[in-house]
Amino acid sequence: DQQVKQNSPSLSVQEGRISILNCDYTNSMFDYFLWYKKYPAEGPTFLISISSIKDKNEDGRFTVFLNKSAKHLSLHIVPSQPGDSAVYFCAAKDRYGGGADGLTFGKGTHLIIQP
Amino acid sequence: DSGVTQTPKHLITATGQRVTLRCSPRSGDLSVYWYQQSLDQGLQFLIHYYNGEERAKGNILERFSAQQFPDLHSELNLSSLELGDSALYFCASSVVGTPPGDEQFFGPGTRLTVL
């Protein structure tokens, strides 16, 4: 039973345009969401997070949107740069009910930025 | 560089054997999490230690165990290895492991190959 789903295994975007990566979750207890970026042969790198009390969080070129009613979040990257080519993982946590538990990850979306 | 170190980088062993993976968290972080990334399952939470004590278990097999030492480094012990245990094993650390602000920072991983 996959509680965090990233339905697009890959996404190709032209350099300079907007990249939108999507994530859906099924566990209504999740209240904290994170995005990680992973290059080959490296560990995941934390990008940005959002608490369920917010619907948007912005950090430079990265913005995460949360739609709780739809159990959906998205990561927007504007403008997309060649160095953004990587696998992006969506992760979620039940901070208060399962505070000591690890993160629940989606299977990732491979973002390819084309010149 | 996340500040989390893992050794060894690669490990090749045979079925039935036992191995130990090592993780040193970022300076000041008390929590260590272990994750397994296999091709078909994505990143799966295994176990969480906080300041030397086990805090939570995820999808960890009984053949696997972990511990965290007084200097806060952690070891993941995998025994009676099977072919299906071949995977990337990541550790991650965070400051407190409970809300607020529990972003996890990942090490580069150990690639285990069981032949």
Image (spheres, coloured by chain):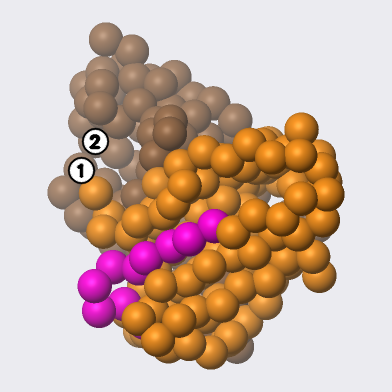
Chain colours: A brown, B orange
Q: Which residue is mark 2?
A: A78
Q: Quadrant of residue A107?
A: top right
> Which residue appears at 40% of the width and 86% of the height?
B70
Q: Residue at x 44, y 51 (%)?
A: B7
Q: Please identify the residue farthest to the left as the structure is shown.
A: A60
Residue of label 1: A61
In the image, B42 versus A2, the foreground residue is B42
Residue A58 percent across, percent down from the top left: 24, 56
Residue A101: name its quadrant: bottom right
Crowding at mark 2 (Cα within 10 Å: few <14, some 14-19, many 20+): some
The subunit carrying tag 1 is A
Question: Which region of the structure is painted magenta?
Answer: B21-30
- Above/below status of B37 relative to A66: above
- Tag 1 or tag 2, which sits nearer the N-term? 1
Q: CA distance from mark 2 to mark 1?
A: 5 Å
> What residue type is disc 1 on?
Arg
Which residue is nearer to you in this view: A95 or B90? B90
Residue at 41% across / 54% down in the picture?
A: B6
Type of the residue with mark 2: Val
Disc 2 + disc 1, Cβ < 8 Å:
yes
x then y, percent, for residue B57: 67, 77
Tell me: residue A9, above or below residue B73. Answer: above
* Dots 2 and 1 on the same chain: yes
Q: Residues within 10 Å of mark 1 (few under 14, many from 20)?
A: few
Q: Residue B14 magenta-drawn?
A: no
SS at mark 1?
A: loop
Relative to A42, does residue B99 appear above or below in the rendering?
A: below
Can residue B1 be seen by looking at this rendering? yes
